[in-house]
Every structure is written in structure tokens, then in C-alpha cells.
Amino acid sequence: MFNMKLLFLLFLSTVLNASNPLTLGEALLILKSENLAIKSASIKVDTAKIDVKNSSASYLGRLDFIQDYANSNEAGNVFGFKLTSREVVGGDLALDTLNFPDSRNFFKSKLKYEVPLFTGFKISSYVKTLKNMARMKGLEKEQIINEKSYQLKKSYYDIALLLNSVENLNKILKNIKTLENMTTRMVEVGYAKKVDLLEVQAKKGNIQRLILQMKSNQKLLLHYISFLLNIKVENIIVPDSDIRMSKYDDLNILENNLDIKRATTGLAITKNMITISKSSYYPTVGGFAEISTANDTFLEDANKNKSYSVGARMTWNIFNGGIDNLKIEKSKLEYLKSNIDLNYAKQGIALKIAKIRTEIETFDSEIISLRKELILLMKFTKTTQVGIEKNYLL
């Protein structure tokens, strides 16, 4: 894993420092490591994973060191200090000594360990919920990667289409300029009117304007690619403009759709919340153990004055005004809503799939038709040029 990361860093350093144009594959690799939105999503995933670890750590309990210090001449306190330090002697029970003691320091050092033994399945349900939330963050990150990858690919293919269009427009412009020259000469000898020349020049101006717009759009797309990659990109290697239709069927798309996965994960979260709500009906049991030592000087005769306590505590709420039952009902309603949201997401994605497939078929037909129109336009301008040349020569 380390070697792979090192190789990628070397590759990234080479790409970032090189003036060579980026391929789409290289750009996609840079996108996943440098895009700011993806970096932010990665931090959210890591944070969610830490929350899971924090929740799981509750099983281990907690160990505290407690240090108390006090100074008092109050009779009860002083006698209690001595009793805790196991230093009560017969003379301490004399009335004057007992009622009017001298002030005394008191240091008590204690180690206390507490551990949950049974929580009504609350901790385990919280852990499951947080794991699903971490999974949700992972799906959100994956969705951002897909979205940014789509935007990057679209920008590359848009530039490819722009370059192809500019190339074709330049061919048309070349023919129109030839036509303009021929028309100019024909106007000079009286075979054509000036309005014919103006019409040709107007068409030339429109083509030149379209070419300038497309070059401007190309620059804007390069700026957008730079924004996506978080680096300066001045040139790219455009991909083939023809894209193959996906072979995935509708069922496969639905099974792998991120929106549906997120809705499914949300359903699992609301199901765990029902279990968490029901945990209020169970008692909670916790165990504890502590060891301490006390004296009028910090840790003096610590071993001699040490003491310990072990025990357990059960807490069981019998009645709280029906709040627990209302929480369960609310959790059930949220689970029902999540189930509806899941089915709604499936229907919505299925509708989008049908819409996209229909649009692709329509666009494919339009592309075929536009290619035919382009071929006819090229032939027309060429034929017109040849016809004018023949008439002029005659």
C-alpha cells in the first residue's frame, strides 16, 4: 500500500509540473486526490469512523483517578478524616479532643473503574446506527466523486465537440471565403450584384462569430477543469467523441444506484432507532470497583491506609409519564417514512432511467441527421463554388 501511494505521488508530481496536456484518465486520477469537495467528503467519512470507535469504546468502561484535598477543624470532618485514614486512637474519643479538634489536612487518592454490564441493547444499537451513518457518509463521498467525475468527463467531451465543430466551421469558412472572392470578381465584371456579395459576407461573419464563441467556450471549459482538479490546466488531450451506450440493464442500475443505497441505509438507521427507543423499558446495570488511600500527607503510608470497594448498580425507570412509549411510536413512524422514501427513490430512479434512455435514442437520431446535413452543406458550398467558377469562366 505504501509503495502504491509513493508511486501515485511521484506520478502526480510529474503531471503537475509537466507542461504536457492532460489525458482524461490522468485528470480523473488527479480529481480523486485534489478536488476540494472530495477532500471535504473524505474528512466527513473519517470523522464518522471516529464516532463509531468512540461509541464502541463505551463497552470498555472508564477508569478515573480522583485526588481530594481538604483542611478543616470541624469536628465531624476531622474525626471522619482520621477514620478514613485508619488513624483513630483512644485519645481521639475524649470529649475535648472530639469536640474541639485541631485543624487537619486530608489527602485522599482514589482509582475508580466503572463499566456498563447491561444497557438494554442501547450501546449495541448506537454502534450499529453510527456504522450506518458512516456508511451513509461513504455513499455521499462516492456520489460526489461520481458527480465531479461526470462534470470532468462532460467538460472533456464538450471540448472535443467544440474542436470538431471549429474544424468543420473552418472548412465551411474556407469555402465561403473562396465564394466571397469569386462573388467579388463577378460583381466587378457585372455578373453579380453587390447585394449577393453582402449576403455572402454576412454568412462569413456568422461563421466567424460562431468560431469565436466556440473558442471562448473552450477557454471557459479549461478554467472549469482547472477548478475541478484544483490545478492550472492550459491544454488537454481530447477523447474520442463517440461514446458507447452502457450495457447495464435497469435491474443492475437500480441495485447499484447510490440514491437507493442511501435510502436503504437510512431505513436501517431508523430501524435501529426503534431498538434504541425500546431500550428505555429495560433496566441498566453497571459495575464498579475502586481502591483508595487517605492520610494527612499526600500518599503517606499509602499501602497501610488503602481500602477498596466493589459493587454494582441497577437502575430501572418504572414510569416517566409515557414519554418512552411516545419515543417508540415516533421511531416507528420515522421507519415507516424511510420505507416509503426507499420505494419512492426506486420509482424515481426507474423513471429517470427510462427518460435518459429515450433521450439517448433521440440524440442518436439527431446526430445521424445532423451529420447528413453537414455532408450536404459541405457538398452544397463546394458545388456552389464550382458552379460560380464555371459561370465566371463562361
Image (cartoon, rainbow, N blue to C red):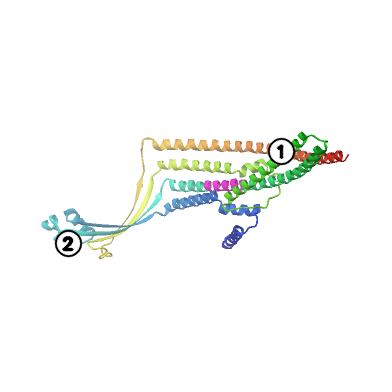
Name the residue located 75 percent from the left edge and 38 percent from the top edge. Answer: 200
In the rendered image, the residue lying farthest to the right is 394
Q: Earlier along the polypeptide chain: callout 2 or callout 1?
A: 2
Range of residues picked out in magenta:
135-151
The disc at residue 89 is 2
Main SS, magenta residues: helix
Question: In the image, what residue type sits under mark 2?
Answer: Val
- Residue at 74 percent across and 36 percent down: it is 198
User: In the figure, is residue 67 to the left or right of 233?
Assistant: left
Looking at the image, residue 58 sits to the left or right of residue 190; the answer is left
Q: Residues within 10 Å of mark 1 (few under 14, many from 20)?
A: few
Mark linked to residue 253: none
The location of residue 118, given as percent across then percent down, is 41, 48
Is disc 2 placed on a helix, strand or loop?
loop
| In magenta stretch: residue 276 | no
Q: Name which residue type carries label 1.
A: Glu
Q: Secondary structure at mark 1?
A: helix
Q: Position of residue 96 (x, y in %)?
A: 11, 57
Mark 2 vs 1: CB contact within 8 A: no
Q: State whether residue 233 is above or below residue 297.
A: above
Residue under label 1, please give it.
Answer: 361
The image shows a total of numbered marks equal to 2
Which of the 4 image quarters holds residue 357?
top right
Residue 194 coordinates in the image, percent (x, y):
77, 35
Is residue 297 left or right of 119 when viewed as pictured?
A: left
Lateral position of residue 248 relative to residue 35, left or right: right
